[in-house]
Amino acid sequence: MNIFKAIKGTADEVRLNPNVGTWSWFLHRITGLLLLFYLFAHMWVLGSASSGPAAFNQRLQMVQSPLFHFLEVGLILVVFYHMVNGIAIAVMDFADISRKHKAIVTTMVAVFAILAIIALVVMLPRVFGGAHPVPGGQA
Amino acid sequence: MSETITSRSPLFWLLQRLTGVFLAVFLITHVKVLHWDFNFTTQGLLDFTFVIDRLSGNIAWVIFYFLFIISALFHGLSGLWAIILDFRPSGGVQKTWLAVLWIVGIFTALYGLRTLSAFYKGGVV
């Protein structure tokens, strides 16, 4: 297995079968891989707690810049997509209503849109507003 | 030559669904407790004091986060395993991948437990 063949195979799947189910499958896969990478990165940042509060605060400060706050908006959208689509998959698998696939996808897109708007409204000001330190904290 | 399989076992399929549903609950709780109220809405920065204020000395949070970590690792690595199998590698390559995924998963779970213990003890190392 080589990685280029894998990417080409995945792209072909989307190109040759461009319906809503293929897109939801493709996005689930891409967001899943991004989240797996994020899980390791997140645990690495927090792992500095084992070296004491100063090391933790130093490493945490690295990831609390406007750039990272912006990336976190993307992260939460990726999380919401994977979560809502994943719940739709579980519902279809367990509730035996796969015939209603299009209705489920429509519902899913609507739920995702609502969550995305909430996330953008809450999180975007933080990217541009500039963060202030914790009262009494060290960061 | 080891046997080549083409899809995950039914047990893995079921666990993928179950951990997925758990993760939704864990993640919403995690974001609410550590990020949403303070960090997102008031634009504050997180630091060690803030985290141990919420988590230190409470064994329930250690259990919560350990279950969260192993669910996330299982879900993510088993998802990656399904992707790998989609590309039909040979039996030997499959075996190697499976071993690597297990080792990475167990190592990362232990690493997470070490971090949790630091928070539980409130930063006394």
Image (cartoon, coloured by chain):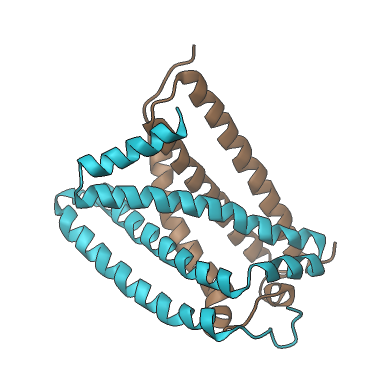
Chain colours: A cyan, B brown
Q: Position of residue A108 (x, y in %)?
A: 27, 63
Figure quadrant of the C terminus of chain A? bottom right
Q: Could you tell me which residue is drawn at 52 percent across and 70 percent down? A: B31
Q: Residue at x 14, y 50 (%)?
A: A99
**Quick check: can you spot residue B11?**
no
Residue in the picture at 16% in, 56% down: A102
Give coordinates of residue A119: x percent, y percent: 42, 75
Q: Determine the image quadrant of residue A45.
A: bottom right
> A118 or A84, which lies in front?
A118
Can the viewer see residue A100? yes
Give the number of marks: 0
Question: In this orientation, which residue lies closer to the viewer: B45 or B23?
Answer: B45
Residue found at the far right of this picture: B125
**Residue B18 versus residue B41 in the image, above or below:** above
Q: Is residue A73 left or right of residue A24?
A: right
Q: Considering only vertical position in the picture, is B46 above or below A89?
A: below
x%, y% of residue B89? 43, 24
**Is A70 placed above or below B98 here?**
below
| Residue at the image point whose x is 36% and y is 51% from the top | A28
Q: Position of residue B114 (x, y in %)?
A: 73, 54
| Name of the residue lying farthest toward the left | A99
Q: Residue furthest top?
A: B1
Tell me the quadrant of the picture where the N terminus of chain A can be found: top left
